[in-house]
Image: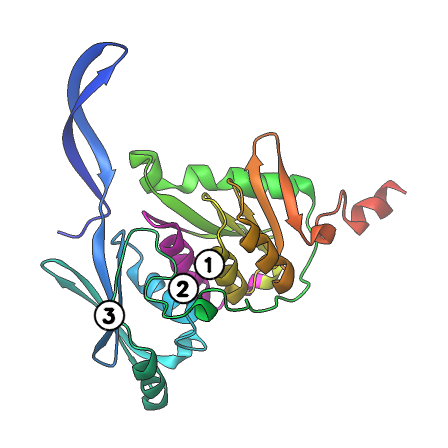
Amino acid sequence: MHVPVQATDREIWRDGIASEGPRLIPEETPLALTYNGGTYAVMMGTPQNLEDFAVGFSVNEGIVGSVDDIRSLDVVRLDDGIELRMWLASEDAARINERRRHVAGPTGCGICGIESIAEAVRPAAVVPQGQTFTPDQIMTAMQAITPLQSINMQTRAVHAAAFWSPARGIVALREDVGRHNALDKLAGALARSRADARGGVVLLTSRVSVEMVQKTAAIGAPVMIAVSAPTALAVRTAEAAGITLIAIARQDGFEIFSHGSRIVARHATEVADVA
């Protein structure tokens, strides 16, 4: 049965005292992404928001240019996993056949099956300038995601990726045992709702690796914010992609690693009001 959370019995040993009791833990299941009848990749992930995952993975991996290139999408639940069955136009299918890979991706793997170093460090899309944000908005955005992480509140074992805009707050939030999967699910949710990512920020409850920057660039968001630190390659990639990379975002503040000009003390309208 493919549900996102399962209950399990456990023995507990804390402060020298033994006890036992149930605990909720996140489910993990193989997710096969197939195009025109052939398997492209098998990822381990949380069985929730699977249509979003299929679309987001397809767009972020460059398999399709947009959600409109996917002619049909079916979620087929099997005994030992779930198949995300997609059909593309014939010309897209021919291109996919050249890149076809049969891999089993471990939890959180973001570049499973990549066949060359060049593919792994491919340049990210360059994002538009977008708008500026204040430090207060950055803090508000990050503080908004915790109450919406329903699976993590039960299990303390999954990542989240969210999109926040000043006008709407949290527009979408997706969870998964894999941080890359969570971001792919978010990308799919935004693509399916035709959301314009240029006016908001991507929020992550994980560290920032190069793949996370590449996926954020594919979404088109000008700013990404994470609770943990970035890698050096992630910073260089964000710089080249024109993305404002903010990390180590905690209750007491945050650190900006690239394109800090988008973060301003106060917006021009606020300055005018004070003057």
Assign a secondary structure to mark 3.
loop
The answer to whether residue 189 is magenta is yes
Provide residue 3's location: percent of width, then percent of height: 20, 49
In this image, 253 relative to 90: left or right?
A: right
Question: In terms of sequence position, does the residue under pointer 1 or pointer 3 come before the other?
Answer: 3
User: Which residue sits furthest right?
Assistant: 275
Under mark 2, the amino acid is: Gly
> What whole-number distance in Å separates the C-alpha atoms at marks 2 and 3?
22 Å
Q: Mark 2 — residue?
A: 188
Provide residue 255's location: percent of width, then percent of height: 63, 40
- Residue 211, labelled with which disc? 1
Tell me if I can see residue 90 in this picture: yes
Density class for disc 2 (Cα within 10 Å; few <14, some 14-19, many ≥20) is many
39 w.r.t. 249: above or below: below
> What whole-number distance in Å separates the C-alpha atoms at marks 2 and 1?
16 Å
**Which residue appears at 34% of the width and 50% of the height?**
178
Q: What stretch is highlighted in magenta?
A: 174-197
Q: Mark 3 — residue?
A: 102
In this image, 120 relative to 130: left or right?
A: left
> What whole-number distance in Å separates the C-alpha atoms at marks 1 and 3?
20 Å
User: Which residue sits furthest top?
Assistant: 16
